[in-house]
Amino acid sequence: MSMKQLILLLVLLFFMEQVARAAVSNTIMIDMKLPVYNVKEGGAVGNGIVNDTNAIQGTLDQAAKTGGTVYFPLGRYLVDTIQVKGNNLKLMGNSAVLLSNHPKYEVSFGADVVRKRSLVNTDLSKQTVLTHIPYERDIRKGQKFLEIPGTVDIDVIQENDLVMVTTEKGDTWAPSYKHGSLRYITSIDRKKRTIHLDSGIETNLRARKENQANDDVKLFIYRPLQNFHMEGLTFELKENGRQNGVFLDFVKNANIQNVRLIGKGQNLTGISISGFDIEISNVYTEGFLSDEMEIGYGVNVAGHHIKVHDSMFINGKHAISGADRRYRNKDFEYYRNTVIDPQSAALEAHGTGENIRIHHNTILDIGKSFVGCGIWVRGKHYQIYENTIMGAATRVPGSSCGIKILESAIGDITISNNRVTDVAYGFMTDLWKEPEAAINVVDNTFINAETGMLLIKLHNAEISANKIAANQNGIVAIGGNNISIANNDIFYERSFGMILQHDPKEPSVTKGIAIKKNKFTPGRFANNIIRIQKGYDDVTISENIFNTVFSTQPFLIINVKQAINLRRATILDNQVISNFYVPITLKSAGLGAFYQLGKASCIKVWSHSPIFRKTL
């Protein structure tokens, strides 16, 4: 089956499942305990010509007083922006389409822009309880209460209100990732002027004090949209209109399912939602691109306890994007999604993300129309596993990749049992600082990549039990410390099996690289198996198997010609399998390095045997 046939089959199966789910939901999912409000009974026409905004808004406002289901019968409803108000609301359609009446917009940025260009949104001014309140007490990490200043009317605050603590304190390596918090209020002690939170503040923050350095802490309190449900609607935006489908800020307990969002080219976001306890499933988005890197998301989520699953995304800058830069975001899960031909990263999360699981997703046609990437993450406490990532048969020029960890990925990240094929880089890192905890890349398969792994400034990592089949390099490491590369099966057609390359931006010497128990198999046109350049010291190469039986010419097994900083090297108990002379297996530039290697008895390794095994 060709890639095109596979994609068509996946799309067909997805829509068949949506039709089945819609048939069930339209018969049993209306909650008869609450009123049902029919938008056509409220005056909506649904012919795609008459502007139905006022009629639908009137129906929504009526439903907001009691809660209930706002029902959209079969039809095409031309709308500007309709606002969701009140709690316990369900927007439900029966093959209903909301058709954008917005004009086409020019390039612009910011949440306010996205909100105004949406077909469905919330009114932030009505949600805002308190804003920009200076906080004048130090906050300790883990603190679960806040004292409300005496200048504020505490009686306007209610339980379940959301509290956003903002600060100018950010990551030193990425200042735009702030150390704020988003929490909700569980109880209020009005006499003590104290609000109690569902969970602790994530970091220490210094209070605003005169003539002292502080973290510029402020409080914002919002009344959330609670118990919101949307199902069975289709949103159609204008082609290249830079418009938005759904924008819901500060919600608590939301479920969106069986919704289609058609962006048609340059458009902003299908669904943008933030808050607590959010689930998005069986959603289809297409055409949310941004050539100017404006936004371009199928689904954009922020907050805590969020799931996005069993959905399909075609031609978006990002299929799913997670985390608000203003505060820490926790407990996301992306699973069983299908993404086709992403413009940038199919699945991604910002550096403010924590406790994120990305698993059992299928990402296809990377690099077909754009230089795309499968999974792209920053932050900490990630588990990325059992994903299938496939590049296009014919790719546009550029550095497409399967899985990428970058910027402020600060550790405790496990990448396991993923399968990546037909991309420029199977796995790559580009870190701005040394991680605080380990990064583990284990039991993955990277097939038909130009380079199996590109490890830029990777620290404190275990690379083990991976299978690599690369057209060029097996593994390229640039800088980084304390890396174990063990038990990998590495085939490479050209260039190098493993190259430790100098980072010109990093003057310090890289130390603590262990290359153990790997099997290296160079192809017919391969070069050195292991090459060490300047900038590396304390390298161990042991118990590896170097299988050169496919090679057509002699070459260096281990080349340390440019390793001018190499003073400590342990090279022992390696095996060479060859079918021709191996005239030189080790080469060194400096006497210091030469003698250190010599003590390990690594110099004289060659044989006249047609096929032989030899221990280095």
Image (cartoon, rainbow, N blue to C red):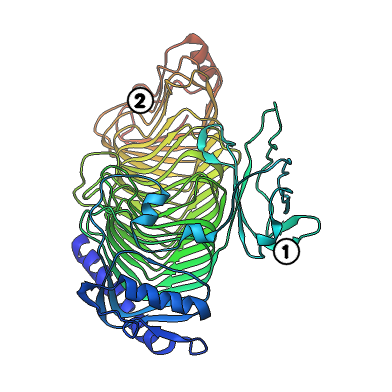
Depth order, front residue of 207/582 = 207
Please state the horizontal and vertical placement of residue 193, each as a whole percent of the image: 76, 55
How packed is label 1: few (under 14 Cα within 10 Å), some, or many (20 or more)?
some
User: Which numbered disc, 1 or 2, marks the residue that appears first in the sequence?
Assistant: 1
Q: Where does label 2 land, which residue? A: 556
In the picture as drawn, the residue positioned furthest to the top comes out as 591
**Left or right of 336: which side holds 392?**
left
Q: Where does label 1 land, which residue? A: 187
Depth order, front residue of 434/551 = 434
Q: Quadrant of residue 472?
A: top left
Q: Secondary structure at mark 1?
A: strand
Above or below: residue 459 compared with residue 303: above
Please name the residue shown 38% across and 71% down the image. Answer: 282
Q: Amino acid at mark 1?
A: Ser
**Left or right of 255: which side holds 373?**
left
Q: Secondary structure at mark 2?
A: loop
- Say whether residue 54 is visible: yes
Above or below: residue 106 compared with residue 306: above
Please state the horizontal and vertical placement of residue 490, each as a whole percent of the image: 38, 42
Give the quarter of the figure containing the N terminus: bottom left
Depth order, front residue of 1/413 = 413
